[in-house]
Amino acid sequence: MSTSLPSPEERLRAAGQRVTSQRVLLLRLLDESKEHLDAEALYARARREMPDINLSTVYRNLAVLKEAGLVEQRYFAREHGREYFEPSTANEHYHFTCLVCGRVVEFETPLIARVRAELQARHGVRVRHACICFEGVCADCAARGQTVPVSERSSSK
Amino acid sequence: MSTSLPSPEERLRAAGQRVTSQRVLLLRLLDESKEHLDAEALYARARREMPDINLSTVYRNLAVLKEAGLVEQRYFAREHGREYFEPSTANEHYHFTCLVCGRVVEFETPLIARVRAELQARHGVRVRHACICFEGVCADCAARGQTVPVSERSSSK
DNA sequence: GTCTTTTTGCAAATCATTTGCAAAAAGACA
DNA sequence: TGTCTTTTTGCAAATGATTTGCAAAAAGAC
C-alpha cells in the first residue's frame, strides 16, 4: 500500500539491482495497488502498460525483488498455495482475511514480537521470519449475517 | 504427535466417516509419525504396508480427514506451497522450523490467543483460523556456526 | 560505442494437487 | 448372509501455479 517511498529506480539501485523497465513497472504497480497482488494479477496490470511483458518475467522479478528486500511475500487464508506480494514497509504488520468477502485487514501488534522473544529465550532459536495470518469473518459480513463462508463447510472447490 | 487417542476406526466412526482400510492406515501412520508428513511422504509410508494404495487416495483422504477435523493442515517455512499434516490434538500449538536442518520445534503460547482477542475487539472481526509459523536457526545449528541457511542467500533451488 | 553480463520473451517442463471414470468396497437392510 | 445403494478407490489424464533452457535484447561498465 502506497507510502512515500523512494522511486522504484532509486530503490532498485540502492539494492544493487539492475534497473529494467519491467522491474520499475512492477514495483510501481505494487506501490500503487491498494490490494495485495499475486503474480497473475500483477501480470494482468503490467500488460496494460507493457503488452509484451511475460508472466515468467513477473515471476522472476518478484523473486529478485523479494531477495533484495524490496517486496514481501505473503500467504493468505485458504489461498495458501498462492503467493501475494506487497512493497516492503518499515512497520511490521499482519493480516486478517475475511473468508466471506475476501477483504484483507492489516493490523499491528507488539504481541508477535513477544512470541518471538519467548521462542528465542525458551528454545534458544533465532527467529528469522514469521508467517502470521488470520482468517475469519469481518465485521461487515458478520453484520450482514454472513457467518458461514460459502466455501468452508461444503466441498472446497 | 503420538498421544493416547481413540483408534483410527473409532475416530472415523465418531466423525461419521466411512471406515476404509486406507483411511485407517493413513490415520495410524500420522499418529505414529514423529514428524509432520506431507502427502508424498505419507504415501511413501503407506505403500510399504499397502503397495497398491494410490497417491490420489492419499490426497482425497487427507482432505476428508481434515474436513472431519481428524487431522490438521500445516504450512511451514519456505515450504509454503506444500501441505503438511498432523493428527488433531486438543492443545493449540505452533511451529518453528529450522532453516538449516529442517527440525520443527513445537511450542505453546497464550499470546496468539491474545492477538485474536485484540483483533476481535479492535476490528470486530471473528477469527476462525490462524496460520502461524516461525522460521530461523535452531539452537543446535547456531551452536554449530550454521547461521546462514544453505538455500537462503543463494538461488532457491 | 563496444564489450560483457544480466535480463527478457517464448515455449516447454515441473511439481503438487485434482478430477473423470469404471471397478471395488462399505454400510444399510432384508 | 446376500442384495442394493452409495461412497471410495485406483488409474490415467488434467490442472494450475511456478520454473527453466535458450537465443535474442537490454543494461551497465569502460
Image (spheres, coloured by chain):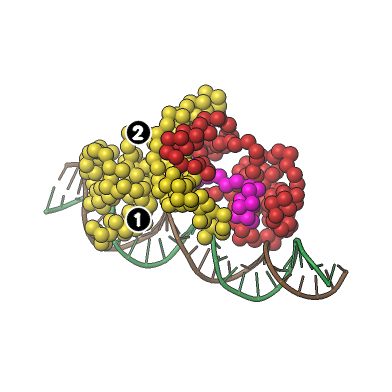
Chain colours: A yellow, B red, C green, D brown
Q: Which of A105 and A18 lies nearest the eye of the viewer?
A: A105
The residue range painted magenta reads B61-80
Q: Which mark is residue B61?
A: none
Q: Which mark is residue A91?
A: 2
Q: Is residue A52 above or below residue B62?
A: below
In this rendering, does residue B50 appear at all? no
Whether residue B75 is in magenta: the answer is: yes
Query: To which chain does the residue with label 1 belong?
Result: A
Q: Which of A108 and C25 lies nearest the eye of the viewer?
A: A108
Q: Secondary structure at mark 1?
A: helix
Q: From the viewer's perspective, is A110 left or right of A24? A: right
Q: Which residue is mark 1?
A: A41
- Of the image marks 2 and 1, the number of the one nearer the N terminus: 1
In this rendering, does residue B73 appear at all? yes
Q: Residue at x 55, y 27 (%)?
A: A123
| Mark 2 crowd level (few <14, some 14–19, many ≥20, 10 Å Cα) | few
Query: To which chain does the residue with label 2 belong?
Result: A
Tell me whether marks 2 and 1 sit on the same chain: yes
Q: Residue at x 54, y 57 (%)?
A: A156
Question: What type is the residue that disc 2 sits on?
Answer: Asn
Q: Is residue A156 above or below residue A17?
A: below
Q: Which of A104 and A24 lies nearest the eye of the viewer?
A: A104
Q: Is residue B27 above or below residue C13?
A: above
Q: Secondary structure at mark 2?
A: loop
Q: Residue at x 34, y 44 (%)?
A: A86
Question: What type is the residue that disc 1 sits on?
Answer: Ala
Q: Position of residue B20 (x, y in %)?
A: 73, 58
Q: Residue at x 61, y 52 (%)?
A: B67
